[in-house]
Amino acid sequence: MFFNMIYGLRETWLVAAAATFQTVVVGGGAAGMMAAISAAQSGRKVALLEGNSQLGRKILISGNGRCNLTNLDADSPHHYYGERPDFIRRTLASFPVARALEFFHQLGIETKVEKRGRLFPLSDQARSVVDLLIDKLAVSRVRVASEAKVAQLSRRGNGFSLVTQGGSEWLAERVILASGGVSLPKLGADTSGLALAQGLGHTTTPLCPGLVPLESADPYVRRMQGVKVWAAVSAPASESQLVTDTDDLLLTKYGVSGFTILNLSAQLVPALERGPLELLVNLFPGQSPEQVSERLRERWLRQPHRSLELSFAGLLATKIVGPLLDKLKLPRDQTVDNISKAQRWLLAQTLTAWPIVVSGPRSFDYAEVTIGGIRTDEIDPETLESRLVPGLFLAGEMLDVHGDLGGYNFQWAWSSGAVAGQGLVG
Ligand SMILES: Cc1cc2nc3c(=O)[nH]c(=O)nc-3n(C[C@H](O)[C@H](O)[C@H](O)COP(=O)(O)OP(=O)(O)OC[C@H]3O[C@@H](n4cnc5c(N)ncnc54)[C@H](O)[C@@H]3O)c2cc1C
């Protein structure tokens, strides 16, 4: 905000005459800020137009306010999805994790590695990422206009004309669209940026929420609401592909969430478009039903007087055990010396492959990313320039690219922003 006041301006302060720039970037999120910095480093006169009153609002709330900047494994293409998953390869190779870290370290953001290779600022503050990006924009002499939502984009001679909702016109030789996805509409996310690209002939793949909790009508899951367990969750992403993730599973009143579910949703949501799916949950990750059955047998031999329900105390949350026993119609109060081998086997099988039917994702209000976006076969993967409109570049989440949970989506934003900014000719 401070830097906005010094170097930026609100669009309403603009003089009536159209401002002319070599490059205008639409969208002041992760990809747009990186694109503007990258373009300005090549000596171009750059403006950045942001619809919100603040830059980087998604960065500010990312990673629970800590911003999971990138991931040690973010150069691996298998973490990214879209109709053409290979599209990201050149961009990531041009601006890999090492370049992103070098950039952030030069800005002054020191980083630390957490579980699964996730990288965070040492300050644990997303705010520091936004403040230092804004500082870099200012040092790079990028003209920043906030509250400047672009409503029209059209060809003007060899360049472009952009008109904001407030009626200000901006002229540009080159335009970089980086208007993000449509998740979290309360932060101002909408389809207006996609519409600008569509107006020039681009098309989109279907849009759905990604990195999002999944809904389930399972009444037993509802009874377990509020419980978080460590679990391995598997599900079919397609007829031939089973996907699995082991981490936190959160049971909620609407269905399931937690790291496992948000991460798997990147691949499961497109499959959910075709109908409900069955998740299989192993509450003893890495263990087979035989191993779990044996574990129960040993526990029950040591304390044969305990009720079936009490026999799980210290092993599994009570709030899960009760509903699961009810679901299997097993007698909670029966002492374990009276539980048959067949009943123990049924329990072991369910504890290692507990089926939960999910019907679909929660809405965009709860999604971290948008699955789908501008079709990538319309974009040159080398430069991110439109194949349909010379001089138009696209970056970030507005493209049909999304990544796994854990810093991959920001890496895509930094890489694509940097490449779109560098790739400008003239
Ligand atoms: C709650 C939450 C937590 C997240 N945590 C992480 C995380 O820790 N790590 C990670 O890798 N990813 C995370 N993500 C995902 C990540 O935030 C996005 O993938 C990333 O911000 C995409 O960057 P972008 O620049 O493409 O889009 P955005 O960050 O959405 O930026 C687009 C910008 O364009 C502006 N805009 C849109 N239309 C117009 C227009 N017509 N005119 C002018 N401006 C416009 C928007 O206001 C916005 O500021 C999280 C997302 C959410 C919602």
Image (cartoon, rainbow, N blue to C red):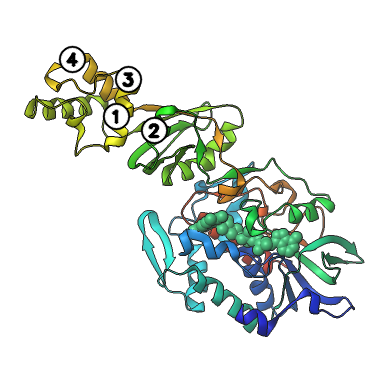
Q: CA distance from mark 3 to mark 1?
A: 10 Å
Amino acid carrying mark 1 in the image = Gly
Element class at badge 2: helix
Return the mark for residue 340.
4
Q: CA distance from mark 3 to mark 2?
A: 15 Å
- Compared across the picture, whether 110 is left or right of 5 comes to left
Element class at badge 1: helix
Q: Is residue 71 visible?
A: yes
- Nearest to N terminus: mark 3 or mark 1: 1
Give the residue drawn at x 32%, y 27%.
324
Residue identified by numbered label 3:
328
The reply to whether the C-beta atoms of the residues labelled 1 and 2 are less than 8 Å apart is yes
Amino acid carrying mark 4 in the image = Ser
Element class at badge 3: loop
Residue identified by numbered label 1:
322
Amino acid carrying mark 2 in the image = Arg
